[in-house]
Amino acid sequence: RRCGGGGGGGGVVWAKIKSPARASEKVVRCYSYDVSRLLDICRQTIAFDTVDDLVQCLRAIVDDGDVRVVRIKNRLDMGYDSGESAGYRDVAINLWVCNSTTGRFGLDTHVCEVQLMLTQFASVKAEDGHKR
């Protein structure tokens, strides 16, 4: 199923798996040593030129019969305090894919994160704006 920036600048922004050092830091600093709360070791970003394209992709993910949504963090919401994230904004979806392929490999309960963001934020993130 395709969802991505329909214009010129959007698309997938390939990410690496979260490093063990960063994962450990996040577990200690953000989750009081509760490893079960770390849900973004495997993550990917899709950037969009418009909010409408982002919303269309979000709907496609939520409506996909193979996807089980665990949590959605909407950092684009006007009520979100962007001071909590140094101005960083996205829609982060924690999910797992549950189908015959993921079941065969034992990955049908593996939680991943898909970050949907506007192209402007993706370019700042790419310049280490969100990196620690």
Image (spheres, helix red, strand yellow):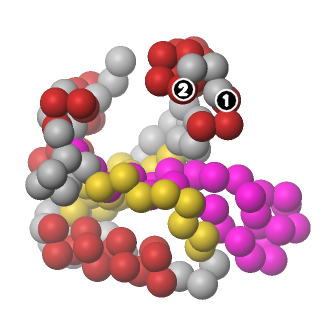
- Disc 2 crowd rating (10 Å Cα; few below 14, some 14-19, many 20+) is some
The boundaries of the magenta stretch are 89-114
Where residue 121 sits, quadrant-wise, is top left
Is residue 99 located in the magenta-colored stretch of the structure? yes
Q: Which residue is mark 2?
A: 31
Q: Which residue is mark 1?
A: 35
Question: In the picture, which quadrant includes the C terminus?
Answer: top left
The answer to whether any part of residue 118 appears in the image is no
- Disc 1 crowd rating (10 Å Cα; few below 14, some 14-19, many 20+) is few
Q: Is residue 27 above or below residue 109?
A: above
Answer left or right for 10 relative to 30.
Answer: left
Q: Residue 120's spot in the image, x, y percent?
A: 12, 48
Q: Are marks 1 and 2 in contact (CB under 8 Å)?
A: yes
Q: Nearer the viewer, residue 132 or 27?
A: 27
Q: Nearer the viewer, residue 84 or 128?
A: 84
Answer left or right for 79 relative to 130.
Answer: left
Residue that appears at 15% across and 51% down: 79
Q: Nearer the viewer, residue 41 or 47?
A: 41
Answer left or right for 55 relative to 23.
Answer: left
Residue that appears at 70% across and 53% down: 110
SS state under label 2? helix
User: Which residue type does callout 2 highlight?
Assistant: Tyr
